[in-house]
């Protein structure tokens, strides 16, 4: 699928299966989302450029690689997107964070914005937008619209599960935004839930079912 990376690493797939399971506790679900966030961060940053810098080991000087180029902004879509954040920040502690508050109107399934706060230098950064569930993609498209309006030019999208409908909508709206996901499920149901999916990620993470 063009523009979509399915992260099929066994650890990711194993943890995803644990998360799908209906009996998983809130604590377990949150911890697994955090862990998968870290693993997906590893994949979404795989092609970051590096440059050789001069260092001294205890034995001798050498040239060694360090990450070069644009600095990162993590942009979780509230509220479920924050479930990825700690794991990603564990790997990239110096990243900036943009918060995008969107909720899905249960009737229209449209994204309604209630909060937006981002670093002022988005244009110079690589922005990684995150939301566990890419369902209708209304939230993802709205979040990326807002980030672009604020100057973001280089954007990637990370999710846990994607529906084919959501992938198509996001790719149609923002064809240059590549998607990283742990799985592509079958379809959306009439309520906009991913099937077979894992239910409402925010409710499962925060115990608000
Ligand atoms: N959001 C969720 O949390 N779950 C879905 O299945 C779809 C959207």
Image (cartoon, helix red, strand yellow):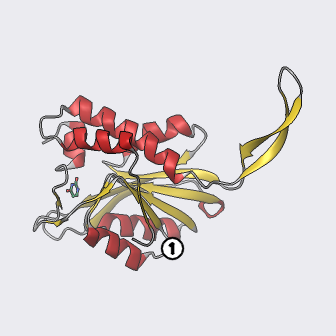
Q: Crowding at label 1, few (<14), some or many (≥20) Cα neighbours within 10 Å?
A: some
As drawn, 30 above or below 122: above
Quadrant of the drawing holding the N terminus: bottom left
As drawn, 13 above or below 142: above
x, y percent for residue 134: 30, 61
x, y percent for residue 69: 71, 55
**Residue 106 falls in image quadrant:** bottom left
Q: Residue furthest bottom?
A: 172
Quadrant of the drawing holding the C terminus: top left
Q: Residue at x 57, y 51 (%)?
A: 46
- SS category of the residue bearing label 1: loop
Q: How many marks?
A: 1
Drawn side of residue 48 relative to residue 135, left or right: right
From the viewer's side, name the closer residue of 26 and 160: 160
Drawn side of residue 175 relative to residue 189, left or right: right
Return the residue at label 1.
Answer: 176
Q: Which residue lies furthest to the front in this view?
A: 10
From the viewer's side, name the closer residue of 205 and 2: 2
């Amino acid at each position: 699928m063009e523009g979509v990376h399915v992260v099929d690493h066994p650890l990711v797939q194993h943890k995803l299966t644990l998360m799908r399971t209906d009996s998983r506790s809130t604590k377990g679900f949150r911890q697994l989302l955090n862990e998968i966030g870290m693993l997906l961060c590893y994949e979404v940053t795989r092609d970051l450029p590096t440059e050789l810098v001069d260092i001294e080991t205890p034995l001798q000087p050498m040239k060694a690689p360090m990450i070069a180029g644009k600095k990162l902004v993590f942009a979780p879509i509230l509220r479920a997107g924050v479930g990825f954040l700690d794991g990603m920040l564990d790997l990239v502690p110096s990243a900036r964070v943009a918060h995008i508050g969107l909720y899905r109107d249960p009737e229209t399934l449209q994204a309604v914005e209630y909060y937006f706060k981002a670093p002022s230098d988005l244009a110079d950064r690589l922005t990684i937008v995150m939301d566990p569930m890419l369902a209708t993609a209304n939230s993802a498209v709205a979040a990326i619209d807002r980030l672009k309006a604020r100057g973001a030019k280089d954007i990637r999208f990370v999710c846990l599960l994607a529906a084919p409908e959501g992938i198509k909508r996001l790719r149609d709206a923002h064809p240059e935004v590549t998607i990283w996901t742990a799985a592509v499920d079958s379809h959306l149901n009439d309520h906009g839930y991913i099937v077979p999916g894992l239910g409402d990620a925010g409710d499962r993470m925060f115990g608000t079912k």
